[in-house]
Image (spheres, rainbow, N blue to C red):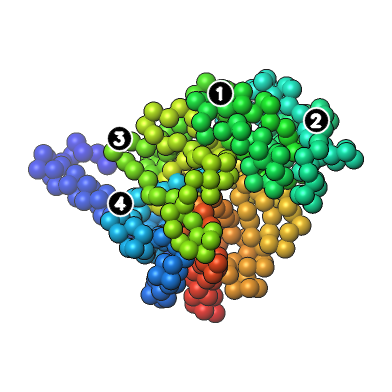
């Protein structure tokens, strides 16, 4: 359009109309209808209410967002007998433990795209302190991680690994690292004695792990443990930046994700630790959350240790935003984070491939048809969870994400069915609507 042919008044009118059209278009894009519709929200509310009111959970907060960030469902129920003064909503900070893993893995995959890392590289390229790691085997030469009977006593021998530990082994939980919950008392006690959460920083943690035996020869098989935490330390060594800085740079600042971090800010607090391990919902006593022994990760403002597998806090809103990256093929808020090919690698089969429940991608479980058969959900969901009961899933078919937040390590008996009941009721509504 040639503005030179109009007088000044006409130009002002035309510019005003163009500006209004732009605003209208933007507004229409932002307010367009959600991609999914929950037919009976009261039914879902009632399920969450039941599990809280009957003493199974201290609180439950569920949030569903569609691909475009519309909140299509959100409900919170709080046990006022346990936490009478707390206000819990989508902006409440929650310890997410192993839901940190997929965040760290996306950071790693971004560094791979940028040429900093390669999954075939040996871990010792970045952590040479691990050159002398050894594997614990029994009298028959079998690594302890491959023995089904945990009552093996404390007789073991340490031998050199028969393979080179790579970044691929770390990302697939095949490096031989573990948590202090193996059930092999003498092995657990060694890890507990290192008091991982009390490490001053990553270098200190690495030094503590150098004398902890591996349970498998690297690459042998899947064994869940601190592999992703070690992977996070690889990222720090490769870039010279802390994992905290990498999250801030690549997610918080670049993609404008708020509600995903390591340290609390001044004045921020976290909810108490709860357990129902003895069938009564109560505040947990020291040592009852025993993944590292008696102590927990620190979240203070001056904390310098960033556990890539367990140490993050998040809000329901912030974590849902992070998950939407997967629905946008690696993008969020019109900014690229990962390539589509990288997203495909994360959700492709890597371990536990023969399970009737699905398979494991890069620490992202992809559900099989068993969920649909039992009425608990859908085939092809991408999901994960954390040590204190937090859960998430991504439905790429219907283009929405779901987050359930709570803070309880071991709900009382009868509370374990909450997730299946809630998600089953949700998907039953979808199936009824799709007939």
Locate the N terminus by quadrant.
top left
Q: Is residue 231 above or below residue 390?
A: above
Q: What label does residue 159 carry, if any?
A: none
Q: Give the labeled residue for mark 1.
A: 204
Say if residue 253 shows up in the picture.
no
The mark nearer the N terminus, 2 or 3, is 2
The mark nearer the N terminus, 1 or 3, is 1
Q: What label does residue 26 carry, if any?
A: 4
Q: CA distance from mark 2 to mark 3?
A: 46 Å
Is residue 246 rendered to the left or right of residue 192?
left
Q: What label does residue 158 carry, if any?
A: 2
Q: Is residue 287 above or below residue 383?
A: above
Q: Residue at x 78, y 33 (%)?
A: 135
Other-residue count near label 4 (Cα within 10 Å), few / some / many at <14 / 14–19 / ≥20 = few
Q: CA distance from mark 1 to mark 3?
A: 25 Å
The mark nearer the N terminus, 4 or 2, is 4
Tell me where residue 400 appears, x and y as whole percent. 48, 59
Tell me where residue 212 appears, x and y as whole percent. 68, 31
- Between marks 1 and 2 in the image, the one whose residue lies nearer the viewer: 2
Q: Give the labeled residue for mark 3.
A: 266
Taking depth in this image into account, of 389 and 403 the one nearest to the observer is 389
- Between marks 3 and 4 in the image, the one whose residue lies nearer the viewer: 3
Taking depth in this image into account, of 111 and 268 the one nearest to the observer is 268
């Amino acid at each position: 359009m040639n503005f030179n042919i109009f007088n000044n008044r006409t130009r002002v009118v035309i510019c005003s109309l163009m500006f209004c059209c732009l605003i209208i278009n933007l507004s229409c894009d932002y307010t367009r209808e959600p991609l999914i519709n929950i037919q009976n929200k009261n039914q879902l509310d009632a399920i969450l209410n039941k599990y809280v009111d009957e003493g199974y959970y201290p609180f439950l907060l569920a949030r569903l967002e569609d691909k475009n960030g519309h909140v299509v469902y959100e409900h919170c129920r709080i046990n006022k007998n346990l936490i009478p003064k707390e206000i819990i909503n989508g902006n409440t900070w929650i310890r997410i433990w192993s839901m940190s893993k997929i965040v760290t893995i996306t950071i790693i995959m971004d560094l791979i795209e940028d040429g900093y890392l390669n999954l075939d590289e040996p871990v010792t390229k970045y952590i040479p302190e691990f050159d002398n790691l050894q594997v614990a085997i029994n009298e028959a030469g079998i690594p302890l991680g491959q023995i089904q009977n945990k009552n093996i006593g404390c007789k073991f021998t340490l031998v050199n690994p028969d393979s080179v530990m790579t970044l691929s082994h770390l990302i697939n939980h095949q490096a031989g690292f573990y948590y202090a919950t193996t059930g092999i008392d003498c092995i657990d006690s060694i890890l507990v004695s290192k008091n991982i959460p009390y490490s001053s920083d990553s270098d200190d943690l690495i030094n503590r792990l150098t004398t902890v035996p591996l349970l498998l020869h690297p690459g042998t098989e899947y064994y869940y443990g601190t592999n992703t935490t070690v992977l996070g330390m690889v990222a720090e060594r490769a870039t010279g930046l802390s994992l905290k800085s990498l999250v801030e740079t690549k997610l918080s600042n670049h993609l404008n994700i708020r509600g995903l971090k390591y340290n609390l800010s001044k004045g921020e607090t976290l909810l108490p630790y709860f357990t129902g391990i003895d069938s009564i919902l109560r505040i947990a006593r020291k040592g009852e959350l025993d993944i590292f022994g008696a102590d927990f990760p620190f979240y203070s403002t001056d904390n310098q240790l960033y556990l890539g597998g367990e140490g993050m806090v998040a809000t329901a809103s912030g974590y849902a935003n992070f998950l939407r990256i997967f629905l946008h093929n690696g993008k969020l808020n019109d900014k690229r984070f990962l390539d589509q090919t990288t997203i495909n690698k994360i959700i492709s089969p890597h371990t536990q491939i023969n399970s009737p429940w699905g398979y494991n991608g890069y620490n992202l479980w992809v559900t099989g048809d068993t969920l649909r058969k039992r009425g608990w959900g859908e085939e092809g969901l991408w999901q994960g969870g954390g040590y204190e009961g937090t859960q998430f899933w991504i439905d790429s078919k219907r283009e929405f994400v779901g987050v359930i937040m709570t803070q309880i390590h071991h709900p009382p008996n009868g509370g374990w069915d909450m997730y299946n009941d809630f998600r089953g009721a949700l998907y039953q509504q979808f199936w009824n609507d799709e007939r």
